[in-house]
Image: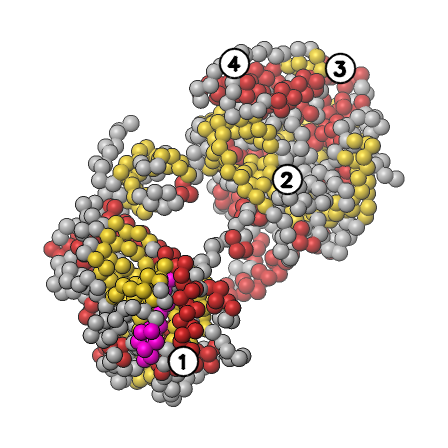
Amino acid sequence: MFIINCPYCGERDQTEFTCHGEAHIARPDNPSEISDEEWGKYLFFRENPKGTHFERWTHDHGCRRWFNVMRDTVTDQIIKTYKMGEAKPVISNE
Amino acid sequence: MSNQNRTIYGGKVNREKPINFVFNGKSYIGYQGDTLASALLANDVHLIGRSFKYHRARGILTAGSEEPNAIVQLGLGARTEPNIRATEVELYEGLEASSQNCWPSVNFDIGAMNNFLSRIFPAGFYYKTFKWPPSMWLFYEHFIRKAAGLGQSPTAKNPDRYEQKFYYTDITIVGGGISGLLAALGAGRSGCKVLLIDENPELGGYLLDYNFSINEKDGKKWLKKIIDELNGLANVVILKRTTAMGYYDYNYLTALEKVTNHHVEFSSTLPRERYWRIRSKKVILAQGAFERPLVFADNDRPGIMMASAGQKYLSRYGVLPGKSVVLFTNNDHAYLTAFEFVEKGAKVTVVDTRDLLNARISEKCKSLNITVFKSYSVIKTYGDKKVNRIEIQQVDKNQNQLTGEVENIHTDCVLMSGGWNPAVQLFSQSRGKLKYDLKINTFVPDKIIENQKIIGSNNGQFNLQENLNESFEAGIAAANELNFNSVEKVNWTGKEEIEFTHSDVEPYMLGKKKVTKGSKHFIDFQNDVTAADIFLAQREGYISVEHTKRYTTTGMGTDQGKTSNVNALALMSHIHNKPVDEIGHTTFRPPYAPQTIGAIAGRSVDKLFDPERKTSMHEWHVENKAVFEDVGQWKRPYYFPQNKEDIHQAVKRECLAVRNSLGILDASTLGKIDLQGPDAAKFLNMIYTNAWSKLEIGSCRYGLMCNEHGMIFDDGVTSRLGENHYHMTTTTGGAARVMSWLEEFLQTEWLDMKVFCTSVTEQWAVLSISGPNSREFLKDLTNIDLSKENFPFMKFREGEVCGVKARVFRISFTGELSYEVNVPARYGRYVWEKFMEHGKKYNITPYGTETMHVLRAEKGFIIVGQDTDGSVTPSDMNMDWIVSKKKEDFLGKRSFTRPDTARHDRKKFVGLLVNDKKTILPEGSHIVEKALKQPPMKMLGHVTSSYYSPTLGYPIALAMLKDGFSKMGEQVVVPLMNGKIIEATVTDTIFYDKEGKRNNE
């Protein structure tokens, strides 16, 4: 079970959090103008990588804030947590 | 005669304190400090139970938590526990235990017939035999489950209390043997917070049972000093009788502490067990190792045990398990046990698989009159309920076969030692990688993943001298890595009479020779898996280690193969002629040992399992005999029966009261969210399908919420309280979901929107009054002008009701003239009682959720989650009227034009009236194209809501029907489970007051 560093509260136990899947999937600005295929991509398609993954979490039993987590899906190590709106961290090649 | 196997002196049991206990109905006496296993052996009881599959006689194999055979049913009644290892049960006065898996008794067991039929029960027998026909499995399963299995679960509710403890520490050390103790000392002296866990009642581990010296002085005294120092350190917490069960990510461990279950008297103040949830900056694993059995024909008879177990019974409990003992070994260290047994008066013969023997050992054997058969193997054993004779034969290791004459030895106890396997279970759970060490012939830790150290024999290091100093230094280093100051190193010189030598793994003592008919070479004792089963699995293609495990069930018992796994892998390696490393190993998973579910649940049982939510009027409902229904966590009145009414009579009376005069509903559970901010209207425009920009202050509007797939997921009325202030209501069950939904979009998509959402569900008590007399009734209790002109339908007003500040919403879920009176929650019951009193002249009638459902169905109002199921759009529900055509965007809008959601032949929301005017269709019934004698039938839809309408005098139903809007007036058929076929007419969904005049009054 993880220890997650909430950007607002600090390190807390995973039981206080909920994961909400892949991060950085922006809602299209102009849904009415895009094709069904593009809309379908926004709705249904996710990366599911082996390795570095960016995902959304909420601190439900804490500050109730949403934030992003950069996690390695192989080692389960959390590389970074950061606030919504902050730029997506670059994956180093190490 | 009692305690006939007890030695005259020796052991650490308290011979002044006899303890009475009962096994299989017979009374015995043991001593304080005994385990159930040692006390049974002392009383010459060797037959403990029957095995899982063949019902073979089984005794005591080990003296610890790895025990596969001696598992018993412990305790009686509601406290009885199955599959308890007799080797771990501390004896207490009045203990009662019995054998498992035998009938009518352990001595005469009918199921033992399976042993003679074993040729028809090989591995995979059940898979192969009970495969066909598929429909028969449920029938077979009943008998198979009955025949298999071990102990019995209690049938009564457990009366005990279990506790949970959340614990945070710098270093957790698992294992209180010499390595763990010294690591704890090193870390403890450095000043960091240490938690030391050990599963035994006494610290010291392996060294408690063997003689050793430290700096050439008695090691036991030194050990006591170490433990005393640890006990004196305030920063070191020691948990005895505590088993580390699970090792999860980020050094999260769970451990089960036996608090009172080694007493017969259960405490009223202490829990039975305490479940520790431990977060640790660093973990040091020092769990030691398990001795490995040897695999030979009929190696499972009572009286055959591990050499280390024999040592423990003798030295710790003063029990001599046999007088004419054979030690069967492949290593030097086990000779220590032979010497110990001779010293305590047993006659010992050694059978050693090796041809060379250390000269010092050879000499000592000579001096003690121990016959040693070198290069020999035990090939078969005899004895019905206890071993009484063995056969041995010479081993030609080069040829991998047996040669020469078979010799007989009469014996009453066989001690075996096949080397040692580190207890890598927790290490492996923490995702540490193992490697096969060819030098010591077993799996040892290789790559560590967590912030962890693994030391001592747990790490494959069996030399005492090296363990002493390395373990102490590991403790210091761990503290150091956590920035605690270093303490001085110590140099101890530790010695055992015989040093550990490493042994070959001896998977299968018969080599190429055929298995003797009628005998079995057990690999996994608990699950009755033999060498022949492993061979069979390989022949039948279950070659991968995971397949072999599942096909043969080796390592799948309650002991999780602690004694069997490495032998099974070694045998596979032997069969395939491949190194064990290439065979690999199966995955270890928590828990390390069986554990009670009660401990995992802790206090979260009964009413504490899931919170109950009650409104501020709840007690009034209880006093007035409401029948309750659970809606999410809420307790809501279902109906209020009077004078022995049944539900139908009560609901009929309640419905008619609302339609004809005045009803009152506790609607406090409705989700309520307070929205404030300059962008609130803009936000609502995105959340709801309809338009909100023009809603005036003081007005209410119904809204539908869709998810991005265009599917309805909640609905409710939202009112504008002020310029930038809205009051949103949601369904009772959907309140939390909607709140999260709003927050998700505000926090992740529209970060620039200035809106604040606050849940106010529990801040307001809601009294919904409904019926043609509600205005007349409320008028006397409020300063709000209720006239139709000043307070029309879908408006909101503030004022006082019964002297309490109130928000009153003129909205209606019944179709009648209605007011939803919101008062601060603490005034809920006060106002409710005032209403009841004042309402007498209108025959005010409290009603519950069932009446609410009937009344809304008469009006065709949907209930999200009952009439919708997450797969319907507003258009499917005939609610296009609430979907804005002008708004460019809102959540879900884009999905309405996807080909599938835009399809015309989707299921649509319609009404159904049964032609016989009396059958109430069961909710969930299917509407079919043509009723046939039996399924399959082509289905057109299903009934979502169905009631008898007291107002109309006949049943009404709502349904989802394929292409339903173009089927108005048509006939459909609904086959029922009882074989009847009901005909119905498709109608629109509003059955009563189609023009909506009544709520506009």
Q: Earlier in the sequence, mark 2 or mark 1?
A: 2
Q: Is residue B131 left or right of residue B943?
A: right
Question: In the image, is A49 to the left or to the right of B653?
Answer: left
The residue drawn where x is 23% and y is 59% is B721
Q: Is residue B504 above or below residue B723?
A: above
**To which residue does mark 4 refer?**
B487
Q: Which residue is mark 2?
A: B259
In contact (CB < 8 Å): disc 4 and disc 2: no
Q: Residues within 10 Å of mark 3 (few under 14, many from 20)?
A: few
Q: Secondary structure at mark 2?
A: loop
The answer to whether residue B235 is left or right of residue B748 is right
Residue drawn at x 71%, y 15% is B218
Q: Is residue B84 left or right of residue B384?
A: left
C-alpha separation, residue under disc 2 versus residue under disc 1: 63 Å
Front residue of B751 and B289: B751
Q: Which mark is residue B841?
A: 1
Task: Please name the amino acid that badge 3 sits on.
Answer: Glu
What is the chain letter for disc 1?
A: B
Please provide percent x and percent y for residue B695. Answer: 17, 63
Query: Is residue B195 rendered magenta in the image?
Result: no
Q: Residue at x 73, y 17 (%)?
A: B362
Say which label, 4 or 3, has the lower sequence index.
3
Instruction: Choose mark 2 or mark 3, whichever is in front.
Output: 2
Q: Is residue B772 magenta?
A: yes
Q: Which residues are magenta?
A: B765-780
The disc, 3 or 1, on the residue closer to the chain's N-terminal end is: 3
Q: Is residue B140 visible?
A: yes
